[in-house]
Amino acid sequence: MNVIELKHLTKNFRSYKKEPGFLGGVKSLVSRKYFPVPAISDISFSINEGELVGFIGPNGAGKTTTMKCLSGLIYPTSGKVSVLGYTPFQRKPNFLKQISLVMGQKNQLWWDLPAYETLLLNKEIYDISDDDFEKRVGELTDLLDVKDILHVQVRKLSLGQRMKCELMAALIHHPKILFLDEPTIGLDVVVQEKLREFIKMYNKKYKATILLTSHYMQDVKELCKRIIIIDHGEILYDGRLDSVVKKFSNEKLITITFEKEVPAEALKPFGKIESFEQRTAKIIVPLKKTKDIVSRLLDEFNVEDLNIEEPEIEEIIRNVFAKKKV
């Protein structure tokens, strides 16, 4: 069952050009020439109930704009958006009670108050009963390990502690749809791992549908089987994470260990040397020539060990974005 559905979604923002200098500033007060700036260009995808999907792309790709359209914060210029059968920008109360948007660079917690005060406020906003509230606070407190900090002023908490409390405030009403926009940004690796474990558990336990954006590929690799790649407002790929290599990679990585030292110059005709140390070399070779190059290496050198690997997903996706900009 599709709980999120986008059809030919487009979002343009208006901007204008100001002529330089004081005179240009005065003219812009009287008359401005506006032009459209496309943020999302005719994108379509759907997400099933309980899916945890990675939504990745470089800065300015359109990820956050898409999230805001899905949560109803902004109107689309054209196209159709449906979340749980609702049109998000209508902001109906029953819709808002079933979703949550967490942005790693934005706070919903009151800075000078303990996080628990925000939880109490959300309790009233979402009309949560006293019994359900106590139960959910206890459960989330244990899962996120925030028992000792709930009654501490938010401004006195570390970034990792604040992010845990942000998640808690966003989940106190048990949303069916969770939009996570860079939830681990700026956190150390230990806290990142703990948050990933929590997100994975929440998705599995409550069958929540989660759309996750992150610049940390480790987040995506550990949490998501499916990814959507967006760049310049266009969908470049929508499918399984493990199929990205097959679709976009046209290279292989050969790791070879020789029985005795071989000069690096002798390996240059075979491909791009990624690294070379003593008797071991890593060579990037064209996918279609892999078999031929391996055969030549075995014929020309005394080889102790040879391994053929796919390039790292991070490197492949970086190359996809780089090619798109050219």
Image (spheres, rainbow, N blue to C red):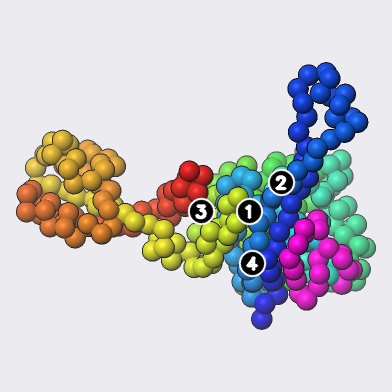
Earlier in the chain: of badge 3 and badge 1, it is: 3
How many residues crowd mark 3 within 10 Å: few (<14), some (14–19), many (20+)?
some
* Residue receiving disc 2: 37
Helix, strand or loop status at disc 2: strand
Q: Give how far across and how far down residue 185 sits, in percent.
A: 63, 46
Viewer-nearest residue: 250 or 150: 250
Q: Is residue 30 magenta?
A: no
Decide: few, some or many residues near mark 4? Use Cα within 10 Å; few <14, some 14-19, many ≥20. Answer: some
Nearest the viewer among 106 and 267 is: 267
Which of the two discs, 3 and 1, sits closer to the camera? 1
Residue type at mark 3?
Gln
- Residue drawn at point x = 66 percent, y = 61 percent: 42
Q: In which quarter of the image is residue 66?
A: bottom right
Q: What residue type is labelled 2?
A: Val
On the image, numbered disc 4 is attached to which residue? 44
The Cα atoms of the two marked residues, 4 and 2, are separated by 19 Å
Mark 1 vs mark 2, foreground winner is: 2
Q: In which quarter of the image is the N terminus?
A: bottom right
Magenta stretch bounds: 74-94
Residue 198 picture quarter:
bottom right
The residue wearing badge 3 is 218
Residue 2: % across, % down: 67, 77
**Relative to residue 183, is residue 236 drawn left or right?**
left
* Residue 117 horizontal side relative to residue 40, left or right: right
Distance between mark 1 and mark 2 Cα atoms? 11 Å
Work out whether 61 lies above or below 178.
above
> Given the image, on which type of amino acid does mark 4 rest?
Ser
Q: Which residue has dot 1 on it?
A: 233
User: How many numbered markers are drawn?
Assistant: 4
Residue at position x 22%, y 38% in the image: 277
Instruction: Classify mark 4: helix, strand or loop.
Output: strand
